[in-house]
Image (cartoon, rainbow, N blue to C red):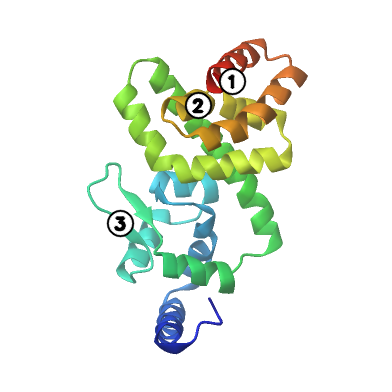
């Protein structure tokens, strides 16, 4: 993106200047939170931000970022969901990377939170609240995918089992075959290592149905 040329490149560079100027106008607390927000994918709620990043004065900071057009509201969603514009996300990732200690904390925090979200989706699904559970699943899918990737990279049996209690069945029943295949094998291995018999049996059943 930094090497774009011609009119598109000019617009891109002008947009980056505008974003940089907006960051110069916000206070350090707002800038710190904004730099950490790209770990949240797609859309997210204030409670997601709180659970993953635990920033001070969250609601005031969110309002200030909204007023600066650095954080957008997704219309018609309850609870309110927010998102970063692609141009803002790209700028933050390339220019405002948090320090390594912060990154080392935010990654596990994000994965743990969305393991909890996956478990809540699963409970609602099993309790017959299909509409609510599926709506939340689609809203949180980018972050659920990121959490799955994290637990696979980390080789965490607990993390994989937590995601596997819900997501393989939902991936299967919503036709997300690539997501299903990516999670099932490492989750099966984790279930075997930890003697999680119920998860192991369910995954084998889903895997069998997948290959029919």
* Quarter assignment of residue 137: top left
Eye-nearest disc, 1 or 2: 1
Q: Secondary structure at mark 1?
A: helix
Image coordinates for residue 196, horizontal then vertical, percent: 68, 15
Q: Which residue is mark 1?
A: 207
Camera-side residue of 17 and 145: 145
Image coordinates for residue 59, horizontal then vertical, percent: 37, 55
Mark 1: give few (<14), some (14-19) or many (20+) Cα within 10 Å: some
- Mark 2 and mark 3: Cα distance apart in space: 26 Å
Residue depicted at x 42% and y 44%: 47
Camera-side residue of 59 and 4: 4
- Mark 1 and mark 2: Cα distance apart in space: 20 Å
Circle number at residue 73: 3
Residue depicted at x 65% and y 57%: 103
- Mark 1 and mark 3: Cα distance apart in space: 39 Å
Mark 2: give few (<14), some (14-19) or many (20+) Cα within 10 Å: some
């Amino acid at each position: 993106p930094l090497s774009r040329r011609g009119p598109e490149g000019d617009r891109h560079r002008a947009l980056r200047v505008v974003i940089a100027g907006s960051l110069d106008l916000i206070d350090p607390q707002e800038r710190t939170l904004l730099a950490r927000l790209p770990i949240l994918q797609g859309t997210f709620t204030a409670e997601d931000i709180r659970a993953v990043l635990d920033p001070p004065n969250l609601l005031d900071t969110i309002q200030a970022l909204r007023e600066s057009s650095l954080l957008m509201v997704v219309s018609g969603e309850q609870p309110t969901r927010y998102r970063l514009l692609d141009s803002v996300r790209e700028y933050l990732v390339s220019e405002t990377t948090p320090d390594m200690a912060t990154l080392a904390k935010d990654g596990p925090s994000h994965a743990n939170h969305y393991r909890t979200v996956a478990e809540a989706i699963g409970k609602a699904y099993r309790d017959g609240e299909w509409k609510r559970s599926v709506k939340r699943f689609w809203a949180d899918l980018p972050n659920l995918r990121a959490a799955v990737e994290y637990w696979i990279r980390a080789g965490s049996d607990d993390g994989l089992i937590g995601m596997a209690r819900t997501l393989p069945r939902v991936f299967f029943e919503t036709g997300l075959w690539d997501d299903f295949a990516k999670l099932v094998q490492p989750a099966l291995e984790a279930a075997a290592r930890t003697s999680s018999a119920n998860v192991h049996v369910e995954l084998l059943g889903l895997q069998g149905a997948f290959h029919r």
